[in-house]
């Protein structure tokens, strides 16, 4: 399957220390979800799922995003994709995807569908087609300590998130706004307009649910947006 390219947008260049921290925690688990429906072992679906995992793992050594549909019979079709964060190396992407597969096999051993978000990569599979479909269900959120109603900092957070949402047609966006660092990404099976729509919703929920937090993460089904204020500023 042809590579679907990602472009990288910087509002400003991240300090090297921030990049190192992100890469060093590449395999940290953010969340994992399993479907309630199960498949029966030693069936064609299990065989197709294993083939899917193999295809995803092999593709991750070359691309940072790919999707596959594996089927022998229509009733046993499995759909799956992976995506790595754009700012990590190919070896780290491959390692993260392998880790994601192992965790899914352990946590969702007989689930017909599952998805996992690690710090550096995302993976999803299902027995129903989902490529190109929006995913704005909240999967995970994290709010940092409150800074109270510090209008200067809160305005900078609003500015950083607005820059991330209006990322000029990029699937991966990162940068700084004053002392606020931010990063956002959409799964590349979305159209760019659906990506912006997803990030707009993620930003809205993040500001609502982490209203006075110095840092926050909001993960929806097909996108995420994150920010953090430099300590001491």
Image: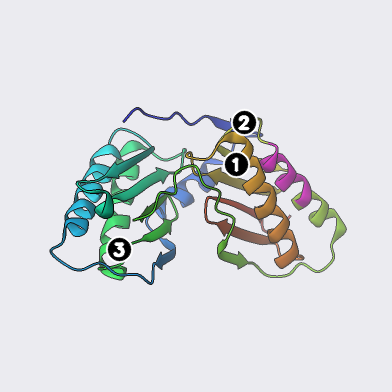
Asked if labels 1 and 3 touch by Cβ distance under 8 angstroms, the answer is no
Which circle's residue, 3 or 1, is located before the other in the chain?
3
Q: Which residue sits furthest left?
A: 42
- Numbered label attached to residue 169: 2
Any part of residue 183 in sight: yes
Q: Is mark 2 on a helix, strand or loop?
A: loop
Instruction: Decide if residue 229 is on the left or right side of residue 2.
Output: right
Is residue 192 located in the magenta-colored stretch of the structure? Answer: no
The residue beneath circle 3 is 103
Neighbor class of circle 1 (other Cα within 10 Å; few <14, some 14-19, many 20+) is many
Quarter occupied by residue 110: bottom left
Q: Distance between the residues labelled 3 and 1?
A: 27 Å
Relative image position of residue 23 (x, y in whole percent):
42, 48
| Residue located 47% across and 50% down the image | 22
The answer to the question of whether label 2 and label 3 lie on touching residues, with beta carbons closer than 8 A, is: no
- Return the x and y of residue 178 as percentages of the image width and height: 75, 44
Give residue 12's position: percent from left, percent from top: 65, 34
């Amino acid at each position: 399957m042809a590579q679907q390219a990602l472009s990288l947008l910087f509002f400003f260049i991240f300090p090297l220390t921030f990049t190192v921290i992100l890469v060093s925690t590449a395999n940290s688990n953010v969340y994992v979800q399993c479907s309630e429906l199960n498949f029966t072992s030693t069936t064609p679906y299990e065989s197709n799922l294993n083939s899917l995992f193999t295809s995803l793992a092999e593709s991750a050594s070359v691309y940072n995003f790919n999707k596959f549909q594996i089927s022998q019979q229509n009733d046993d079709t499995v759909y799956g994709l992976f995506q790595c964060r754009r700012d990590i190396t190919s070896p780290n992407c491959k390692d993260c995807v392998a880790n994601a597969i192992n965790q899914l096999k352990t946590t969702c051993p007989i689930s017909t569908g599952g998805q996992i978000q690690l710090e550096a990569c995302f993976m999803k599979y299902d027995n129903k087609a989902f490529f190109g479909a929006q995913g704005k269900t909240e999967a995970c959120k994290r709010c940092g300590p409150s800074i109270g109603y510090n209008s200067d900092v809160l305005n900078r957070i609003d500015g950083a998130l607005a820059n991330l949402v209006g990322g000029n047609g990029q699937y991966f966006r990162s940068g700084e706004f004053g002392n606020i660092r931010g990063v956002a990404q959409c799964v590349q099976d979305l159209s760019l307009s659906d990506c912006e729509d997803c990030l707009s919703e993620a930003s809205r929920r993040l500001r609502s649910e982490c209203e006075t937090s110095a840092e926050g993460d909001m993960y929806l089904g097909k996108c995420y947006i994150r920010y953090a204020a430099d300590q001491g500023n």
